[in-house]
Image (cartoon, rainbow, N blue to C red):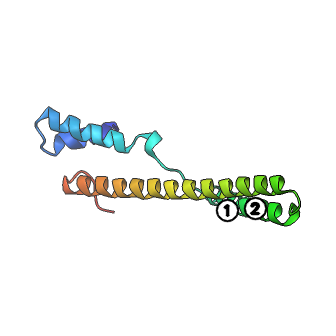
């Protein structure tokens, strides 16, 4: 917890040290770097590349290996695997992003109601 938050908690009128520790642990959990989701345009571009790559592998296998069923099946399976994994990662990342956004909004509301943070 940043030092200025502890001072704000003490000034806010919370006398019980357990309450301050509970709020401090909640803020520490909110500010944990491992819980932050960092997204960029590069992440979106990589997912689009994987999605298009999976589609092209599927089409490559279907169009070029009509005589060789084993190769056609192998390319089709790999392409579908890439497509499914890209879709799953996209959904999981979006859920994490929404969860992080909701947690930040809730923490801001709690701090504003406790008069610890000026409204922006």
The spot of residue 56 in percent (x, y) is: 77, 63
Name the mark nearer the viewer: 1 or 2. 2
- Percent across and percent down for residue 66 are 86, 63
Task: Indicate the position of residue 7 as horizontal and vertical percent values.
Answer: 24, 39
Near mark 1 (Cα within 10 A), the count class, few <14, some 14-19 or many ≥20, is few
Which residue bears the numbered disc 2?
A: 58
- In the foreground, 38 or 113: 38
Q: Which residue lies at the image location 23% right of the left edge and 41% below the top edge?
A: 23
Name the disc covering residue 96, or none. Answer: none
State the image quarter where residue 41 is shown: bottom right
How much space separates mark 1 and mark 2, taking CA atoms?
Answer: 15 Å
State the SS at label 2.
helix
- The quarter of the picture where residue 99 lies is bottom left
Q: Residue 63 sits in which quadrant?
A: bottom right
- The residue identified by callout 1 is 48
Quadrant showing the N terminus: top left
Q: Earlier in the sequence, mark 1 or mark 2?
A: 1
Q: Residue at x 23, y 43 (%)?
A: 8
Q: Are marks 1 and 2 in contact (CB under 8 Å)?
A: no
Vertical arrangement, residue 14 with respect to residue 72, above or below: above
Left or right of residue 40: residue 82:
right
Disc 2 residue crowd, few under 14, some 14–19, many 20+, Cα 10 Å: many
Name the side, left or right, on which 11 lies relative to 32: left
Looking at the rendered image, the quarter that the C terminus falls into is bottom left
- How many numbered discs sit on the rendered protein? 2
Task: Please report the residue visible at 67 percent of the width from the left and 62 percent of the height from the top.
Answer: 48
| Front one among 62 and 16 | 62
Q: Secondary structure at mark 1?
A: helix
Is 14 on the left-hand or right-hand side of 110?
left
- Relative to 35, residue 57 above or below: below
> How far from the left and from the top, in percent, is residue 109?
26, 58
């Amino acid at each position: 917890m940043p030092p200025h938050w502890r001072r704000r908690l003490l000034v806010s009128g919370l006398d019980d040290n357990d309450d301050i520790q509970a709020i401090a642990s909640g803020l520490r959990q909110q500010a944990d770097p491992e819980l932050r989701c960092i997204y960029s345009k590069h992440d979106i571009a990589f997912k689009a590349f994987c999605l298009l790559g999976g589609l092209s592998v599927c089409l490559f296998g279907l169009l070029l290996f009509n005589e060789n069923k084993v190769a056609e099946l192998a390319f089709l399976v790999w392409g579908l695997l890439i497509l499914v994994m890209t879709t799953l990662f996209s959904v999981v990342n979006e859920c994490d992003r929404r969860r992080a956004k909701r947690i930040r909004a809730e923490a801001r509301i709690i701090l504003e109601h406790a008069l610890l943070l000026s409204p922006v």
